Image (cartoon, rainbow, N blue to C red):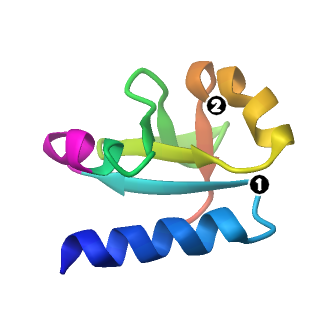
Amino acid sequence: YGRQVIQAAAQYVDASAMDLAILFCHPGLAAWYGQFGWETCADAETRIGTPEAYTLDRDLRMMRYISSQAKRARNEFLTHPLYIEWPW
């Protein structure tokens, strides 16, 4: 059922007005998510907090670039840290 869930989620995201989608997972799952169009951001840091005070998140960040704007900004997401002010 995992394949059905991730395919349904991908279809929903792709049909939405979202610019991009992000998921976090164990690095061992990168290939599995990759077959559904998720791209790894293996070298980009995800920081929990603010630029002044943060901790590094060790989960692998994966992204789907939906809009043309997000696709143009892809390199920025791959080379700059992403800040999340509060963890889930």
The answer to whether residue 86 is left or right of residue 73 is left
Please identify the dominant SS of the magenta region: helix
The answer to whether any part of residue 88 appears in the image is no
The residue wearing badge 1 is: 19
Picture layout, residue 85 above or below residue 63:
below
Q: Quadrant of the C terminus?
A: bottom left
The Cα atoms of the two marked residues, 1 and 2, are separated by: 13 Å
Residue found at the very far left of the displayed protein: 28
Asked whether, in this view, residue 4 is left or right of residue 69, the answer is left
Instruction: Report which quarter residue 81 is drawn in.
Output: top right
Residue drawn at point x = 52 percent, y = 45 percent: 63
Residue drawn at (79%, 48%), measured in percent from left and top? 67
Instruction: Indicate the quadrant where residue 12 lies.
Output: bottom right
Indicate which label's residue lies in the foreground, 1 or 2: 1
Q: Residue 61 in the image: x percent, y percent?
A: 42, 43
Q: Amino acid at mark 2?
A: Phe
In magenta, the rendered stretch is 26-32
Q: Nearer the viewer, residue 57 or 1?
A: 1
Residue of label 2? 77
Precedes in sequence: disc 1 or disc 2: 1
Image location of residue 25, percent across then percent down: 28, 53
* Tag 2 secondary structure: helix
Q: Is 83 displayed left or right of 31 in the figure? A: right
